[in-house]
Image (cartoon, coloured by chain):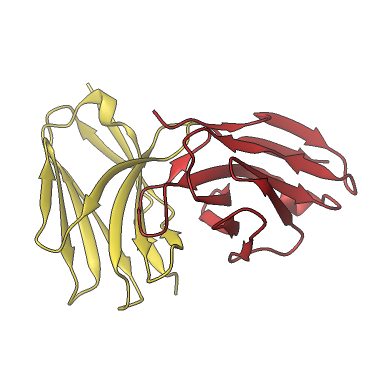
Amino acid sequence: DVKVTQSSRYLVKRTGEKVFLECVQDMDHENMFWYRQDPGLGLRLIYFSYDVKMKEKGDIPEGYSVSREKKERFSLILESASTNQTSMYLCASQRFSGAGELFFGEGSRLTVL
Amino acid sequence: RKEVEQDPGPFNVPEGATVAFNCTYSNSASQSFFWYRQDCRKEPKLLMSVYSSGNEDGRFTAQLNRASQYISLLIRDSKLSDSATYLCVVKYNTDKLIFGTGTRLQVFP
């Protein structure tokens, strides 16, 4: 089975702090994604990556950056956390472009005070 | 207008009932369609892909109507374990998947 592991299930941070969310997949998938999920808004794509050191902006990249130094690891960075970034963050991987199915991690619930 | 729209529900149905969800999408260039299931406080998981001719997987039937730009999911003989949120997902010619906000189903004894 594909395993997508997110480093923290729950985080509480203060406004202005730098936040790192880590995601690791163990199935040698090419593509990785970061979404946030909010009530009434569904899943919205923040960033995605097709390859090591490559990144593409999704629909809501403002306030976020990403890093993919190794194929299996995709990190989401909040340079200066704000209260409107309180959300559930979901990482996903995809075997290759066109494969369709996304495999999600269990999510990281971030609260920014 | 949202790119993918779903009735949020909840749909409250008794065990054994048949229930159907619809989802509409706005971009006629959409290429692939999926239903994902998300249990409470869990991550989404693929339930089934949706093919042009319609497809069935056990008690679940998915259909696509390109002319009217909607997809549907039919669940027959509902089980308590079917209680979840069902997410409609649409893919364009890139690998961006657009998720609907989900339809919540609650099956009661």
Asked where in the image residue B7 lies, by quadrant, the reply is bottom left
Q: Horizontal placement of A34 versus A53: left or right?
A: left
For the residue pair B57 and A15, the one nearer the viewer reads as: B57
- Say left or right for B11 vs B3: left
Answer left or right for B4 relative to B57: right
Q: Quadrant of the C terminus of chain A?
A: top right
Is there any visible trace of residue B6 in the rendered image? Answer: no
Q: Where is residue B34 in the image (x, y as percent from the top left)?
A: 29, 53
Q: Quadrant of residue B3?
A: bottom left
Looking at the picture, does residue B17 appear above or below residue A96? above
Q: Where is residue A70 in the image (x, y as percent from the top left)?
A: 65, 44
Q: Residue furthest top?
A: B109
Q: Within the image, what quadrant is residue B77 found in?
A: top left
* Residue depicted at x 20% and y 75%: B68
Q: Which residue is drawn at 42% across and 47% down?
A: A95
Horizontal side of residue B34 vs A106, given as left or right: left
Q: Colour of chain A?
A: red
Question: Chain B shown in which color?
Answer: yellow
